[in-house]
């Protein structure tokens, strides 16, 4: 039996994890809706997915703006009739600075994007998923959600907030068809790691770029969590920093 195409909405889809995820689901025959602030990048990626026979559209969206997220969800519903998977991926690492030296405006922007942006996605997509009988949400989390890392007060705090949202949504809607899981991938070879490297703050900035996992591994993990493999992790964070997690997904083990 041919697998039915899913509608997948991905925030922060202009590069890194979001781009890799959009390309993977597009290759699998799903309807992909790419969202990011940089319209040119997502339009290019969506066009390349369509050139390969996939179904993809691009929506310029600043997740910090609730009306933008509302328009994104409405676009997906108007075009495809349902949303099967939301990937809350959009996030920023800056400001990287000790708290007393941080820029208040940059700190507030991190809250708006990393934390409120996830809330906006949840707030808009959950009613639609309830109406259609269920759906899956993957929140991109981080080990920073449970650890205090020097210079990352904004990132650690907002990721901790996202983990709490994952737990809250599972508690409120888990018995009503809403599957939600966090994904803590570890360090990933994206532009965010280049920003971290340039900061020179904390041990993460000292890591060689070669040790970071490719974003394609994270995309494969999102696909795994979107299926029945994610059932055991609902309401929690799934980690790719363990051999248990990597084995489950079929990725190389940690050496």
Image (cartoon, grey):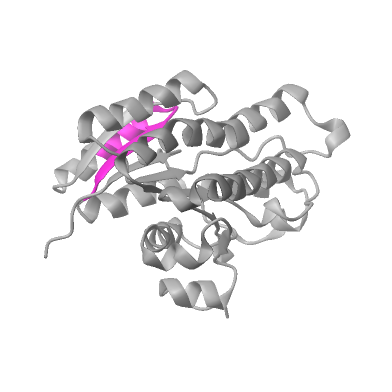
Quadrant of the drawing holding the C terminus? bottom right
Vertical position of residue 43 compared to residue 144: above or below = above
Could you tell me if residue 89 is visible in this image? yes
Question: Is residue 219 shown left or right of residue 89?
Answer: left
Q: Position of residue 98 (x, y in %)?
A: 83, 39
Residue at x 23% of width, y 54% of height: 27
Whether residue 40 is in magenta: the answer is yes
* Quarter assignment of residue 208: bottom right
Question: Is residue 123 shown left or right of residue 57?
Answer: right
Vertical position of residue 179 compared to residue 217: above or below = above
Q: Residue furthest top?
A: 67
Q: Position of residue 244 (x, y in %)?
A: 54, 77
Q: Position of residue 156 (x, y in %)?
A: 72, 46
Residue situated in front as seen by the camera: 228 or 127: 127
* Quarter assignment of residue 100: top right
Vertical position of residue 93 compared to residue 147: above or below = above
Whether residue 36 is in magenta: the answer is yes
Residue situated in front as seen by the camera: 238 or 113: 238
Residue at x 47% of width, y 77% of height: 247
* Quarter assignment of residue 143: bottom right
Q: Which residues are magenta?
A: 30-46
Q: Residue furthest right?
A: 100
Residue situated in front as seen by the camera: 157 or 16: 157
Quadrant of the drawing holding the N terminus? bottom left
Vertical position of residue 205 compared to residue 35: above or below = below
Could you tell me if residue 194 is visible in this image? no
Residue situated in front as seen by the camera: 122 or 240: 122
Residue at x 65% of width, y 26% of height: 109
Q: Position of residue 41 (x, y in %)?
A: 36, 33
Residue at x 45% of width, y 75% of height: 248
């Amino acid at each position: 039996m041919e697998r039915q195409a899913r509608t997948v909405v991905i925030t922060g889809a202009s590069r890194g994890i979001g781009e890799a995820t959009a390309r993977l689901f597009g290759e699998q025959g799903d309807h992909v809706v790419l969202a990011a602030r940089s319209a040119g990048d997502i339009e290019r990626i969506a066009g390349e997915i369509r050139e390969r026979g996939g179904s993809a559209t691009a929506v310029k969206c600043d997740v910090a703006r609730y009306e933008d997220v509302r328009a994104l969800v409405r676009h997906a519903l108007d075009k495809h009739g349902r949303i099967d998977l939301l990937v809350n991926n959009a996030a920023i690492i800056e400001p990287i600075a000790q708290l007393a030296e941080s820029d208040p405006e940059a700190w507030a922007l991190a809250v708006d994007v990393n934390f409120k942006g996830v809330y906006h996605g949840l707030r808009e997509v959950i009613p639609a998923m309830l109406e259609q009988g269920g759906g899956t949400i993957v929140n991109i989390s981080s080990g920073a959600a449970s650890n205090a890392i020097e210079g990352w007060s904004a990132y650690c705090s907002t990721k901790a907030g996202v983990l709490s949202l994952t737990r809250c949504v599972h508690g409120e809607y888990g018995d009503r068809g809403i599957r939600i899981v966090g994904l803590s991938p570890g360090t990933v070879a994206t532009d965010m790691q280049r920003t971290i490297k340039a900061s020179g703050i904390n041990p993460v900035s000292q890591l060689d770029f070669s040790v970071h996992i490719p974003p394609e591994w994270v995309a494969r993990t999102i696909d795994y969590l979107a299926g029945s493999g994610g059932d055991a992790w609902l309401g929690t964070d799934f980690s790719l920093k363990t051999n248990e997690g990597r084995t489950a997904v079929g990725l190389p083990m940690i050496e």
